Amino acid sequence: MATLDTRHLVDPELAPLLDAWPAFELSAETLPAVRARQLPRPPMPPVDVAYDRVEAPGRDGAPAVPLHVYRARNADGALPCILHLHGGGYVAGSAGELADFHRVLADDLRCAIVSVDYRLAPETSFPGNVEDCYAGLDYVMREAGALGLDAARVGVMGESAGGGLAAALALLARDRGEHHLAFQHLIYPMLDDRTCTADPHPTAGEFIWNRAKNVFGWTALLGHEPGRDDVSPHAAPARATDLAGLPPTFISTGALDLFVDEDIDYARRLIAAGVPTELHVYPGAFHAFTIVPGARVAQAAQRDSREALRRALHG
């Protein structure tokens, strides 16, 4: 197996994140410390938005699912809504960690953000996490009037594992036929467990989220080793053979991200299935690059993402 050495390909303005990001191995033994660690996040300006914490009933006897609801004060009437799913490799992260980001996003886009605190693997393996996300969607749709939301303008968004869950939720919503999503917005999404068993990419996957972490995350989610033939597309969306009928899609990723090939291939297949799809691949960018303040490629990615969300919510 080849050893990657791609530091020379990194956008120089992104390089400081590689020095600031804590180095760690991901295993059952290190997972508690990883969950407790504070990762670098860009500073966010203070904004005044309405906030509520509610609970969606769990599906099929599962525990209630906490939802964090942020509503812009600078908009009138029923608000369009982003159902947001946080990242963390399926094994870490929480909705609360992104409170500042969600406040700013809701204010800027004159919308509501509903962030789902889904259960984490390995304590809860598939399908528990995506069912938590579906419970959140079901609650938002059924309680849209009480929450002040426009049920016709609800889309799903996530980064990394959250992007994978967003794509899985879009498939699950399509397949169950109970709720219609207005869009899916996927930021360097984690879509395909088979990346764990494929030949190493010659230039992608060295930084932040690497092959070893990916194997741990997928194994924790699936409850078995990745790459088997029986993996559900509601766990690994890239496994879906039919992508027709999915909502308009935005995908962005970095050229050095471990997920670059699976993300490009998913976009290609969505386009072939007739799904309106926008794809961005940013040169010199690795996983989580969008959090680097001041880097022009990160600013471009954030700008492209915000404008696509603005169109999806208000267009």
Image (cartoon, rainbow, N blue to C red):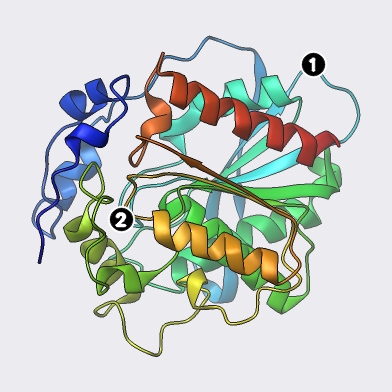
Quick one: label 2 or label 1, which is nearer the N terminus?
1
Gap in angstroms between the C-alphas marked 2 and 1: 35 Å
Q: Is residue 57 visible?
A: no
What is the quadrant of the N terminus in the image? Answer: bottom left
Q: Residue at x 18, y 35 (%)?
A: 7
Amino acid type of the residue that numbered disc 2 sits on in the rendered structure: Val
Amino acid type of the residue that numbered disc 1 sits on in the rendered structure: Asn
List the residue tagged with mark 1: 74
What is the quadrant of the C terminus in the image? Answer: top right
List the residue tagged with mark 2: 91
Q: Is residue 50 visible?
A: yes
Foreground pick, 255 / 258: 255
Please give left or right for residue 168 compared with residue 92 in the image: right
Foreground pick, 27 / 10: 10
- Name the secondary structure under disc 1: loop
Q: Residue at x 44, y 63 (%)?
A: 262
